[in-house]
Image (spheres, rainbow, N blue to C red):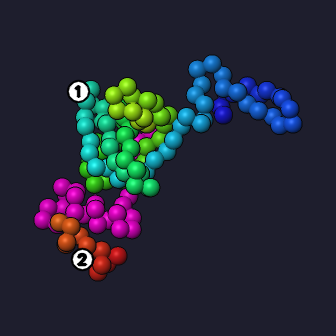
Amino acid sequence: MAGAIQRRGGAEDQTAPVLGERSEQSSASWELAITSVHTSRFGDHVIIGRDEDGQLRRALAPAKRSPRDPAVGESWRVTGPIRNHPEYGPQLQAEVALPLVPRGRAIIRHLATDKRFPGIGWATADKVWERFG
């Protein structure tokens, strides 16, 4: 933990956070398959998607923390602390938000949902995957 002060106690050394520093336990990193994106008037994004376990998750990604706008069907890695929103419950406050290169069967979702591939639906994307992997 950068900037932490060292405290000695008992048989093991422990570190404690310095005032203003977040505990590592409150931080998370999720790979989300994006199901919807909502953009605020300030350009920030609320990303809703499924994590590796299929659980629906919410992340708030400030525009300055991501290289471009996220889109439905993409997979993104978001990392940051989890905070409880009074209306929507737990959501990750992204300190880092990056798009991931599709791999494996995620390529099917990418081809079928990305606007850059007009005319390719789920059936065609599945055939492309079966043929080329």
Provide the residue designation for mark 1.
Answer: 41
Q: Which of the numbered marks, if any, corresponds to residue 127?
A: 2
User: Is residue 20 visible in this depiction of the protein?
Assistant: yes
Q: Residues within 10 Å of mark 1 (few under 14, many from 20)?
A: few
Under mark 2, the amino acid is: Lys
Q: Earlier in the sequence, mark 2 or mark 1?
A: 1
Q: Residue at horizontal 30%, vertical 36%?
A: 45
Neighbor class of circle 2 (other Cα within 10 Å; few <14, some 14-19, many 20+) is few
Amino acid type assigned to the residue bearing label 1 in the image: Arg
Q: Is residue 71 above or below residue 18?
A: below
The quarter of the image holding the N terminus is top right
Spot the residue most to the top: 19
Give me the residue at 42% from left, 35% from top.
90
Residue 52: image location, x then y, percent: 44, 55
Q: Residue furthest left?
A: 119
Residue segment shown in magenta: 95-120
* Helix, strand or loop under label 2: helix
Look at the image and say whether residue 66 sits in the magenta stretch. Answer: no
- Image coordinates of residue 95 in percent, x first then y, are 46, 35
